[in-house]
Image: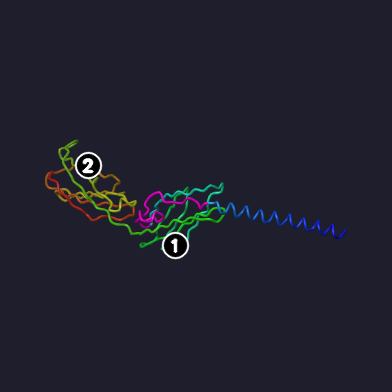
Amino acid sequence: MKTHNTVKNSLLLGAILTIIFSSCHREDYFYEIDDAPLFEWTDHFSQLAPEILLDTIKTNHEFYYEFRCSDVHVKAPVLAMAHTEGNFDYEFVDNILRISALDIGYVQGTITATDIYGKSSELSFQLYAFFNTRPVAKGNAQLIQNLSESEVEIDLSQSYDTDANKGGGIEQYEYRITSPSEIVYSVVTPLSKINYIFKEKGLATIEFRVCDNDGEWSEWETIYVRI
């Protein structure tokens, strides 16, 4: 009876060990054939090192960088940020890195995408953040004699923000119009063109400047028009 129990226990132990080793083998097998997630930038990357994103950005503006991240598993890879330098805010939204630098200088970091087996791929970014640069005001004035012989069109549409390619833009236009008798009319408006009717003949002075979307004004510029 004792012998029978011993044999029975040995068989049971062997079965358990077989299941354990078999399970371990299957886990090792799936781990071995598993590939790390596909992880790559879609633009702005370095041609010499495609896994590194290089760009310049303006402080306190949000920039968007798209990446591809895919995996064969049902559960999506987990994204994490590491090895960061610089002062910035970020978030991941639908395969897009949204990042905003809070100070000038370099901001950089490494993003990892990790699958359910713990295999991961990495992307890095190195961005240089600069402070807002001032806009430039440009304008001209001409007699249009539409409603009056003394009607002038003032056109500032050629003004521009020097960092327009990094999110900058013109939002306000300030006009200071001085008649030949030195009567001054001033206005701030989002319009890049205005018309003004003078009530007297002579040489008029038109000063103007523009303001960008960071609240910074350009230098004053001056043009003259003879009425």
Pinpoint residue 147: horizontal percent, then vertical percent: 19, 36
Mark count: 2
Is 211 left, or right, of 153 in this rendering? right
Q: Which mark is residue 119?
A: none
> In the rendered structure, which amino acid carries the disc numbered 1?
Thr
Residue that badge 1 annotates: 84
Question: Residue pushed farthest right?
Answer: 1
Is 107 left, or right, of 138 in this rendering? right
Residue that badge 2 annotates: 195
Instruction: Tell me the quadrant of the picture where the N terminus can be found.
Output: bottom right
Q: Secondary structure at mark 2?
A: strand
Residue 210 in magenta stretch: no
Bounds of the magenta span?
Answer: 35-59
- Please, is residue 146 above or below residue 131 in the view? above
What kind of colouring is applied to the model shown? rainbow
Instruction: Tell me the quadrant of the picture where the C terminus can be found.
Output: top left
* Viewer-nearest residue: 149 or 116: 116
> In the rendered structure, which amino acid carries the disc numbered 2?
Asn
Structural crowding at the residue carrying mark 1, measured as other residues with C-alpha within 10 Å and reported as few (<14), some (14–19) or many (≥20): some
Q: Identify the residue at horizontal 50%, vertical 54% (top origin).
A: 113
Q: Identify the residue at horizontal 70%, vertical 55% (top origin).
A: 18
Pinpoint residue 161: horizontal percent, then vertical percent: 28, 51
* Viewer-nearest residue: 207 or 106: 106
- Label 2 and label 1: CA atoms lie apart by 53 Å
Quarter where residue 102 is shown: bottom left
